Image (spheres, helix red, strand yellow):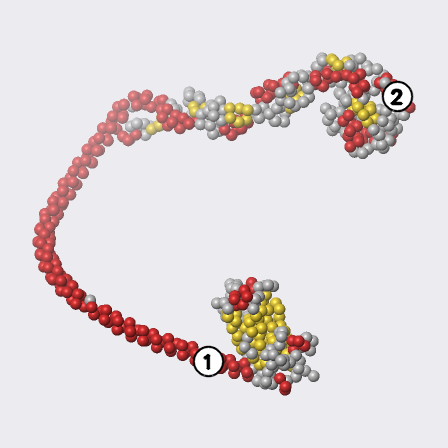
Amino acid sequence: MELSEINRTCQSACEEDPVTPQQQSRYDSIRSPSRSRRQSGFECEFVVPAPTLIQTECSICLLILKEPYLIGCCGHNFCKVCIEQIKAKAMPCPLCGEQEYGVLPNKGLQRSMNELKVECSKKSVGCLWTGDLGSFNTHLNETYDSYTQLSGCSYVEVECKHGCGGRFLRNFVSNHQNEKCPQRPFCCDYCRDYNSIHADVVHRHWPLCKFYPLRCPNKCTVYAIERQNMENHLENECPLKVIDCEFQYTGCTVRLPRQDMPTHTSKMYIEHMTLLSSLNQKLIEDLSAKDDDFAVFSDEVNSKISNNEAEIEQLRNENSMLKHTLAEMRSDMQTMFVQIKQSITKLQDQPKIQEEKLKQHSDFCQSNVDSLNSSLDSVQSSLSTQCYSIQAHMGLFPIVFKLNNFEKHRENGTNWISPPFRSSRDGYKLCLVVECKVDGGFVSVYACLMQGDSDDSLSWPFCGEITIQLLNQLGDRHHATGTIRFTLFTPSVYAARVYDSEHGPKGWGQQKFIGHQELGYNGVKKRQYLLNDCLCFRISRVEALKTL
């Protein structure tokens, strides 16, 4: 289809299908006032009105078509950016309301429009440019490339390349960027060392620059004084600095600016000399008084020297006598030293003999002590065993058991079994089984029934309560307490009478009696269950209940 036929089709479609109010509302809803004009159509006017058969206006942005695209449903043309935004929002055709439609670039219409003459959109502010629509973009040159923004229409606003945010006509942006922009690169004019932006140099560097020129605070004739020289100027050079008269030490109290001081000195010469003469006379009188005081002091010193000479002579005589006595003492000490040395030589052999005798006696005594200690340990162990045996056999509570080498049991995963004990004198015979394994993180405590002499007279299965305590080895409180209960509902494998072995195959008790992490020292409660690799268990009470 030729371009003329396409245009006639579009024109007829526009005449046959006028825009309805509903279509117009959809059309207005997609037209945003904030849409960038650089992305939609051209804002310019034709020098000569465009041919009526050519659609030159976008029905969305209402501007001259920019990169026209032909829509397949109703045959209208839209700007590329406008129709792409419509399709991106999945909206229907803004004119005919068709949901599905295709678009393609209308290059023939683009070529025809590029040859039309247009006026610059900035004509209202003074631009006289006219030319082909195809070169209109080049004339405007609205890009922000810092290398090309100075070429193009002089009435287009462009941003400052230094990033200050200001927008200026292209005619004036160069002046702003080079002379007025606070963000322009700038070097300090005074020290020539600090390079930054203009605002930073002026507001941060200049108040500290040591070469920055300052005005004298006294407002003297020196106008530009470097900051580093200001102190020296005020102290030694400023003619308006108020200073004391150089004859101040004579009594002159005049204070004048430095530039007036020579006149004062010349004018007050006689007065200064008078003050100087008075000061000199006063010094002479003071010196005469000092001479009298010095004479008195000299007499006193001479008298003390005469007295001291007699004392010095006496001290010299005493010193001579002391030297003679010291020489005699040295001679006596030398004689004594020789005698002592001879005596030591004679006695050198005696300590060896005495040492040998003492060693033999010490070995004999140590042997006796070791024998006595061994006997004492044996007696204590025997007594302890006998006491425990009596206590356990009679069922006298509490009974304390010590589990030694706890770490070894825990590493090897072995169980510790306590010596047997009875619930009463002729009661049930039991033992305590402790699991120390690392797995699970807990110490488990079980009560295990054993074969006893009085089993025939006892009722079975065993029912009762056993109270067990893990003792706090730092004091008599904060013990870990647990109760093991045997009831009629306890499995028979744990509570039944033992016939064929020393004790039952399993024990009944608490699998999580206490965690391993709780065994160590607790400073808050002042407790420690594990001490010197030993745990102490106490059977506080065993109460056997009769069964029916």
Check disc 1 and give the amino acid type. Ser
Residue 352 - label: none
In the picture of the structure, the residue carrying the numbered disc 2 is: 9
Image side of residue 8 versus residue 67, left or right: right
Residue 242's spot in the image, x, y percent?
37, 27
Looking at the image, tell me whether mark 1 or mark 2 is earlier in sequence order: 2
Q: Nearer the viewer, residue 468 or 277?
A: 468
Residue 64's spot in the image, x, y percent?
78, 20
Q: Quadrant of residue 423?
A: bottom right
Task: Identify which residue is drawn at 58% across, 67% down.
Answer: 443
Spatial separation of the CA atoms under disc 1 and disc 2:
126 Å
Identify the element where label 1 is drawn. Answer: helix
Residue 382 - label: 1
Check disc 2 and give the amino acid type. Thr
Task: Identify which residue is drawn at 24% across, 71% down.
Answer: 354
Task: Identify which residue is drawn at 64% across, 23% down.
Answer: 145
Residue 204's spot in the image, x, y percent?
51, 30
Image height of 41 relative to 297, above or below: above
